[in-house]
Each structure stands twice: as structure tokens, then as C-alpha cells.
Amino acid sequence: MPATEPVRLGRKRALPSCPNPLFLKWLTELRDEAKEKGLKIQYTYQKAINSLNKYPLPLKNAKEAKILQNFGDGICKILDEKLQRYYRENGDVFRLQCVIIFSSKKNAAGDQRKDGGGDGGRKKKREYVPQRRSGGYAVLLTLYKETQVPGSKGYMFKMELQTEAQHLCDKSFTVPDLGSKYTAWSSVSTLIQKNLLIKTHNPARYSLTEGGLALAERLASVEQTNTDGDREEVRSELEATEEDDNVVDLTGSDEGEEEEEENRIHCDVDDVRSSGKPQNSQTTTTSRKPNAECLLPGTYEIMLCVDFIETTGGSHHRKQELVKELQRNGVNFDIRKLNVGDFLWVAREKVAPVAGQLRAPVGRELVLDYIVERKRMDDLCGSIIDGRFREQKFRLKRCGLRKPIYLVEECGSAASHLSLPETTLQQAIVNTQVVDGFFVKRVQDVRESAAYLTIMTRFLTKLYQNRTLICRSRELEGDGGSDEEERGLPSCSLMSFAEFNHGAVKNKCQTVREVFARQLMQISGLSGDKAAAILEHYSTPHSLLTAYEQCTSEAEKEKLLSSIRYGKLKRNLGPSLSRTVYQLYCTQGALT
């Protein structure tokens, strides 16, 4: 057999250029002009530029730009005037914009064709490789494993192949996803077209071609490498020591000595319960047993947690309908109080009953990285009016779970009788997805909500099967994703449910650091990431004021915070925001 080649299961795509270069050019000119004159409208233009860069579709006129954030009547009127002038001078603006966008790509492709020699200038066709844990991927691996069994018949029937390949695929081979007619088995036709699979006889027999056998062998070697890497990663995490905990949690509890002491006592009690024998507290805190901190495959089950507010109060009939639908679908769920979100999933440890006890001991629970906030359109309207909408999104971002989901239920004809226009509600939903980075799922009624929760529960059960889950502390979480997430695998470093729910309490006692963070976030333009970056350098107002006193000049005080870097891109805070914070905390008397 030829030497195995590394298989690329994916690639990073280059970010596309802005599809509205004329609007971007004009807004940039307006911003620069306002900046030279010292006008504050420069910040409005900058916000409009940011919104335009995030919008992926071309705009035919400025009226269509009104759906974007920070595009008011004034900006749209200016852009329309410039657009009409440009139209008179250059003709069809929309077509010209498309030409501007794609001309560079065409020129680059033309240069490649000119440089191509003996092959007639044709671009080399890329080899087809199915995505990891897709239907084609699972079918190829399953047939390859069948060929490696001594005395195998060299082919498999459809039912046999679907059953054996299911655990290697995230989607079902028999049941289509909600709103789709395709299953994972649909990818078999692609494999046949690519001459990787042969279908013969009746009933159908499926076997690999020579090309399919070579590709499947390479996929199997990569799968083995990934499995070994996962085991090594779990081993390294179990042996790792406590990492740097400078990341500020704006909703978590304080990191003081009393909290650490309570954690030690709590850990001592848990260890005594699990082992049945008291241990020395010093031994417990310094040398934790790895098995006490992780859930091994087969020792836990995935369960949906439903907030009790979703089943009581309000429209009792509609809320009970959700529970009945979940029961009808056979979903394993539990109703409890959730301090943030409406639905989430936990991995609950399976605990055997103890002889002589009425109830089985309570198993440990680790929270998966998925949390759902459910909103009817009328509830969304009310939350925007009273301010809960922004506050709930902030708490979801800071709760410690990396994949927040907004489940939006349509009201049908009732949407026309709401306090806000439907366009405003649609804009809020789009901003939640594009600006805040939430995954938005839109459904029609309670039944579709229950169907979505059912499918998500089954998906997560498949996703986390055969995975070792490690319990981590909330104080050790970072802003960046783990290596597992970069490879498309679910994170196996999870918080306990008790710690998660305690950290998400809305009106709990706040520390000086938390109050200082919320105080900073009241400043216009100072987001949570910026506040967290300031708190990494100055954790209290006293430390900030002390730093201002040590500055030798007024200019140095105004620029004290300008070089602080925030967010994933590590951008500077900037002189303008630094000057605003300085004026807020150091100006005597009322601000003007």
C-alpha cells in the first residue's frame, strides 16, 4: 500500500471583502471629515461602518441599510444623495459594486491560468474528502473496518451498514432533521458518484472501490490519531496544576479567602461521601484523586433541565403542553430552578442504590456548554421595553457556557398587535445573531419548540458519548476556546451544576470588584470585555485612583488606560475612552 498522506478535513476560508464598497468608502470619508473637525458624530459613523462590515449581502440603495444598526434617517439620506450623484456619473451602481467586489478574484484567477503551463492552464481538481462525523465519513470507515475483519464477505447490506455506522455520525441515518428531508444516508449517492462506493445486487450490497479503500484507510489513520490525541489530552488535563486565574468574571463570586475556604470544606464533604471514610483536609486539597473529578464513558446520562418558570404561571395550558410534548417524545428531563436561561443540559452521574437506603445517592452533575433562552414575540417585545432583553443577553454571555441559543417563537397574527413594530423586533433578533454571536432558532409554536429540544437532546447524547468529562472550576475558565473546540469536538471540561447555578444568581451580594465593573459598564462605549480588561490592571476604584495620583501630568492621567488591550483581537482601549474614565473619577463636582 502507498504511504498514508495527511488528510485535511477542513480549511480556513479567507474573510470576504465588504459587499458594499461604495457605502463603506463614503462613510469612511464622512468619519474622517468629522474627526478633523472634532465632531462627536464621528463615533456614529464608525458604528455604522462596523455594522456595514458585518452585513454579508449587497445593498441596492440606502433605504435597505435601515435594517442595520446605527443607520438612521440622516445617514441614509446622505448616502442616498451620494448614490444618486454616483448613478448619474457612472450608471448602474449595483452592477458596478459587484464588479468592484469580484474583479480582484477574477484577476487573480486569470493570473493563475496564465502561469499554468503544460496542463493547459486548468486548475488542479481538489480531492473529495467527506467531513468528519458526516454520513459519508461514517460509511467509508465502517466498510473499511469490515474489510479488515478476517473472513469478511467484503460488502454490507443497507440496514447492517446503517446500524454499524451510526455511532460514527452525528446525524441520523434514518430520521431527517427538523425542516429537512435529507438524512445522513443521502451522502451515499455522493460516494457512488465520486467512484468511492459500489452498489450491486438486490437487495443492495455496498462495497468500497480501490479509491474508496485508499481514502478510507487514510481516514482511519486520522481517526486513530485523533483518538490517541484525546486520550493524551485527558491525561494532561488530569495532571495539570491550577492555571492563572486573572480572568475577571463579572457575574461570578469573589475570589477571597472565605470563598476558597468554603470550597475546601465542600470538597472535603464530597470526598467523605464518595469514599465513605473521612480524610485529612490537607490531603484532600493538595492531592485530588483524578477519578473524583471526571465522569468516564458509560457512567453518566445526558438530561434536559427545564426552568420551573416554563411550566408554571402565565398561560398554564400552553406551558403544560410543552411538558406533555417532551414526555410524548420520550425526553429525559427534569424541572428545576435555573438562575439564568430557560433550558440547559447536564451530564448526570449514574449512581446505584445503596442497600438499606430509601433513595439512591445524588449523582454529580456537569453542565454541557449549551443553554437556551426561549422567547415568544410578545415576551420579546416586553423585554425590550423594560430593559430585560439586554440584561438577559449579558448574563447569558457571562454565565460560563460557550454556546448560548435564542429560541424565538412566532405569534402569528398576534404580532400585529404588539407595542413595537414588527421591523423593530426582527432587527433585535438579527442583532442577537450577528452582533452578539448567539445561535438563533426560530419556530412557529410550542410543539416545534419541544421538537427542537428533543432533537438537541438526542444530538448531545450522541455528541458526548464515549467522552470523558472533566469537572473544572469556574475561576479557571478563559475567554478562548479549547483545542477540542478548534478541532470541532465538544469541550469535555465542564462546570458542576451547583457552581454554575450559584454563579448565575441575579441579585446576590456583590463584591467591590463586581460593583466597579458594573459601574464602568454604565459609560457609553465601554463593553464587558473592556471593563474586564481594566479590572485586570485595577481591580478596585481605590487602585485606579492611586494610579492616577502617581501620574506626573494631566495628559499622562488622561492616557493612563489608553494602552490597555481587550478582547480576542487585543485592541487598545484608546485615548477617548481613557479620558472619559479619568474625567468620571477625578473631576471635582458635577460633570458638564
Image: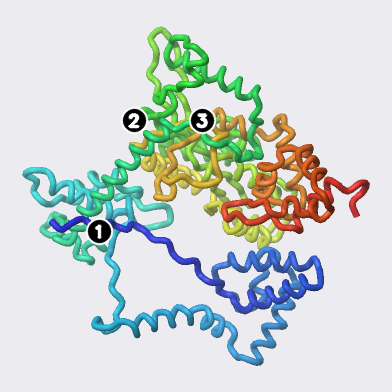
- CA neighbours of label 3 inside 10 A, class few (<14), some (14 to 19), many (20+): many
Residue 510 lies, with reference to residue 352, above or below; the image says below
Seen as rendered, the residue at the extreme left is 151
Where's residue 172, x and y in %? 33, 48
Q: Which residue position is annotated with label 2? A: 298
Where's residue 267, x and y in %? 52, 20
- Closer to us: 220 or 190: 220
The mark found on residue 496 in the picture is 3
The mark found on residue 418 in the picture is none
Quadrant for the C terminus, please. Answer: bottom right
Q: Secondary structure at mark 2?
A: loop
Quadrant for the N terminus, please. Answer: bottom left
Of the residues under marks 1 and 3, which one precedes in the sequence? 1
The mark found on residue 188 in the picture is 1
Amino acid type, label 3: Ser
Amino acid type, label 1: Val
Q: Residue at x 50, y 69 (%)?
A: 16
Amino acid type, label 2: Gly
Q: Secondary structure at mark 3?
A: strand
**Does 436 sit left or right of 233 as displayed?**
right
